Image (cartoon, rainbow, N blue to C red):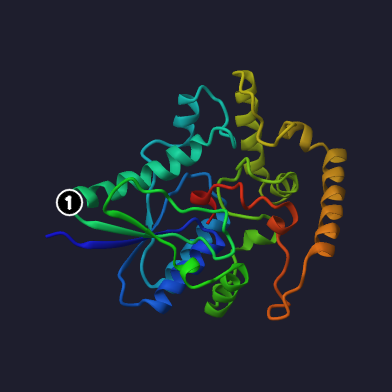
Amino acid sequence: MSTTRHVLGLSGGRDSAALAIFMRQRHPEIDIEYFFTDTGKELPEVYEYLTRLEGYLGKPIQRLNPDRDFDFWLKSYKSYLPSAQSRWCTRQLKLRPFEKWVREFLEAGDTVISYVAIRSDEEYREGYQSKKEKLLVRLPFKDASIDKPGVIEILEGSGLGLPEYYSWRSRSGCTFCFFQQKIEWVRLKAEHPDAFEEAKRYEKTAIEHGSPFTWSQGESLSDLEQPARQDQIKQEHEKRLARAKKRMQTNPLRPDVEMDLDDVYGGAAKACLTCHK
């Protein structure tokens, strides 16, 4: 007998966590299966936040570990780093495990409804484009007109708050995500030096194999980590921040919402939806 299964993917980020809370509060009658596609290269703060979220939801978050890890796929792609032009990391480490997981439900004749955390203020974003008749995508935040301040309100109201990495980074995802701004690489070196060193090793191997990409556009991490260059990046960031604050219009209904790195750099439209929500 076929059934309807409800699934919601969590990235360890702000929006998907808020959506999980929203659905639990607004639709407690729906039995949602929560999942996290673990690349094995996530920030430690992500795992800590997911554990706290499990406590709030009162049910486990399934870990969809890919059957082949980042190192396997890096070798398959001849040590070429993933990039904005070739997002093989998202395809192989995020989408592939999800599609494999839901395939057994669909083959059993079930209908799968996937809830995706695209906000009402993200007109440029689209959800996962399903090619399966019985895999349906729902966008509750768009339907309920919930924007970024609304997401923060949900998280603060639940007592969960934001993941700790938002104090220095703009989103979740792999420690060496190529969508990071240069200031985030500087901060990664300060917050998680071991992860920064691992990213350097991957980059060095990639360059030796002829990869046209470095993690940070236009320079290697070895160049970026030089003290003089770090100081320059910090100074450039402060200038950008000052300009962004002058442009930003305060919402009188939510005057306490703080500016984040996406407000400063406008990088949200480019980042992978699957990884960073």
Q: Which of 11 and 52 is in front in this view?
A: 11
- The front one of 194 and 83 is 83
Report the label total.
1
Residue to which mark 1 is pinned: 108
Instruction: Answer with left or right where residue 76 lies relative to residue 262.
Output: left
231 left or right of 65 in image: right
Residue at the front extreme? 123
Q: What element carries label 1?
A: loop
Q: Position of residue 11 (x, y in %)?
A: 49, 55
Quadrant in the picture for the N terminus: bottom left
* Residue in the image at 78% along x and 32% along y: 223
Residue lying at 41% horizontally and 48% vertically, measured from the top left? 129
Pick whichever, 70 or 5, lies toward us: 5
Q: In this view, does 69 lie to the left or right of 43?
A: left
Quadrant of the rendered structure where residue 229 is? top right
Quick one: 136 or 8, which is closer to the camera?
136
Residue 146 coordinates in the image, percent (x, y): 54, 71
Residue farthest to the left, as pictured: 1
Where residue 120 sits in the image (x, y, percent)?
55, 66
Up the image or down, 80 lies above or below 227; here it is above
* Identity of the residue drawn at 29% across and 57% down: 112
Is residue 52 visible in the rendered structure shown here?
A: no
Q: Is residue 107 visible?
A: yes
Q: In which quarter of the image is residue 238?
A: bottom right
Q: Is residue 270 left or right of residue 65?
A: right
Query: Residue 32: percent from the left, percent from the top?
Result: 33, 66
Q: Which residue is drawn at 46% across and 58% down?
A: 10
* Amino acid type of the residue tagged 1 in the rendering: Ala
For disc 1, the neighbor class at 10 Å (few under 14, some 14 to 19, many from 20) is few
Placement of 118 over or under 159, stated as above or below = above
